[in-house]
């Protein structure tokens, strides 16, 4: 019996209440004033602050807040999560559904846009609310839980032998508890043509305690090649706890990649992006995509022009080894892949 199967047996009886990540998640900042106070900031320090957003409230786990610089209203981590009044400005071309997933919808929360890969929306929930995210306008309430959809979704995948990779996305699929994830993984592993499992998640970065021994054991013993694509935009997001979580995932045989979004005032300079790539490598993770922002209503102030984005990448290309250079891409509705710029 492999080491991870032993761990799985040992820990599967543990009650969920003992899991510290759930307690940490419950202790997240949900109000602007509490977060600012914890950082030694006052509302008056941020002239454009929206203290009480009507939709897409503030949500920040304590560990992530702990990586922000005290007393710095322009901290790049804070900028990603702090609601601003400018979000309410109407900007031409910025819409609520920029990615337009409707044509790719196979039902049961399955999206099929690209060859060989199906994407399953595992949950609509996230542990952090990133202001630039295109999901800020989505409600997944009509979708139902992934457990209720799992039978139909896996039958759909089983009927299409061209699909060899399932991508769990959301929301954040690692917000599902271990038991549900185990069910999904076991179910997938019974589909003969399924070779790879991919998980798109920000949790190893913003809530590293989510990477439990049991999670690692589930992924290690699935029999599928497993890729975890994390999401970090700035080198300071990868603290010691994230590094440890990523190390644990790697030890479980998981291939680690990172995707970032190019964000004005957060990471749109060559030094930051260079340091991000270096820090990722220290954490055993290779840069994968650098996304041009989806034109989502409320996020226009994060936009970096294509011209500047391409210049940034050209500067990086001269400074970094090829394997530390992310691919600059944009999502174009209806296209057969993410489009390189
Ligand atoms: C981004 C995306 C993928 C993954 O694309 P890769 O280029 O393989 O990373 C798959 N399905 C959907 C619906 C996506 O949006
Ligand atoms: S889906 Fe990802 S980018 Fe969007 S809010 Fe959730 S964690 Fe942030």
Image: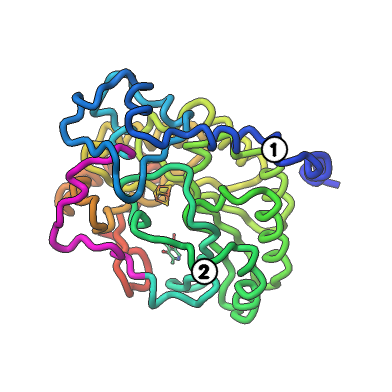
Pick the front one: 219 or 120: 120
Residue at disc 1, secondary structure: helix
Disc 2: CA contacts within 10 A as few (<14), some (14-19) or many (>=20): many
Report the image quarter containing ligand 1. Answer: bottom left
Mark 2 vs mark 1: give the one in front.
1
Residue drawn at the location 51% of the way across and 42% of the way down: 203
Disc 1: CA contacts within 10 A as few (<14), some (14-19) or many (>=20): few
Vertical placement of 108 versus 299: above or below?
below
Q: Is residue 94 magenta?
A: yes
Residue 334, position in %: x, y? Answer: 33, 75
**Quadrant of the frame with the C terminus:** bottom left
Label 2 close to label 1 by CB (< 8 Å): no
Residue drawn at the location 39% of the way across and 42% of the way down: 324
132 to the left or right of 138:
left
Vertical placement of 194 versus 34: above or below?
below
Residue 113, position in %: x, y? Answer: 43, 72
Residue 303, position in %: x, y? Answer: 20, 49
Vertical placement of 252 versus 159: above or below?
above
75 to the left or right of 228:
left
Residue drawn at the location 61% of the way across and 54% of the way down: 226
Q: Tell which residue pokes out farthest to the bottom in this image.
A: 159
- Label located before the other in sequence (2 or 1): 1
The answer to whether one can see residue 110 in this image is: yes
Residue drawn at the location 44% of the way across and 71% of the way down: 114
Q: Which residue is mark 2?
A: 109
Labelled disc at residue 17: 1
Q: Quadrant of residue 3?
A: top right
Residue range in magenta is 81-100
Whole-Å distance between the Cαs marked 2 and 1? 28 Å
């Amino acid at each position: 019996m492999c080491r991870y199967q032993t761990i799985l047996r040992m820990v599967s009886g543990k009650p969920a209440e003992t899991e510290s990540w759930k307690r940490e998640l419950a202790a997240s900042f949900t109000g602007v004033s509490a977060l600012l106070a914890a950082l030694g900031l006052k509302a008056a320090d941020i002239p454009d602050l929206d203290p009480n957003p009507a939709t897409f409230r503030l949500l920040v786990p304590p560990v992530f807040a702990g990586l922000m610089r005290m007393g710095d209203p322009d901290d790049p981590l804070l900028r990603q999560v702090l609601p601003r009044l400018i979000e309410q400005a109407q900007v031409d071309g910025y819409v609520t559904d920029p990615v337009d997933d409707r044509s790719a919808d196979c039902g049961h929360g399955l999206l099929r846009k690209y060859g060989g890969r199906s994407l399953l929306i595992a949950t609509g929930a996230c542990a952090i609310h990133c202001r630039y995210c295109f999901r800020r306008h989505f409600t997944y309430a009509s979708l139902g839980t992934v457990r209720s959809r799992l039978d139909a979704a896996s039958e759909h995948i089983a009927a299409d032998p061209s699909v060899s990779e399932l991508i769990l996305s959301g929301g954040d699929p690692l917000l599902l508890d271990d038991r549900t994830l185990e069910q999904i993984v076991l179910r997938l592993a019974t589909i003969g043509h399924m070779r790879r499992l991919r998980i798109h998640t920000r949790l190893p970065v913003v809530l590293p305690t989510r990477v439990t021994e049991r999670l690692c054991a589930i992924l290690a013993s699935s029999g599928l090649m497993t890729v975890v694509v994390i999401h970090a935009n700035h080198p300071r997001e990868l603290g010691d706890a994230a590094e440890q979580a990523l190390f644990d995932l790697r030890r479980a045989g998981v291939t680690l990649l990172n995707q970032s979004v190019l964000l004005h005032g957060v990471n749109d300079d060559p030094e930051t992006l260079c340091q991000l790539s270096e820090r990722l490598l220290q954490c055993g993770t290779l840069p994968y995509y650098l996304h041009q922002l989806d034109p989502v209503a409320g996020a226009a102030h994060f936009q970096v022009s294509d011209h500047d984005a391409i210049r940034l990448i050209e500067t990086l290309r001269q400074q970094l080894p090829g394997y530390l250079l992310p691919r600059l891409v944009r999502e174009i509705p209806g296209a057969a892949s993410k489009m390189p710029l």
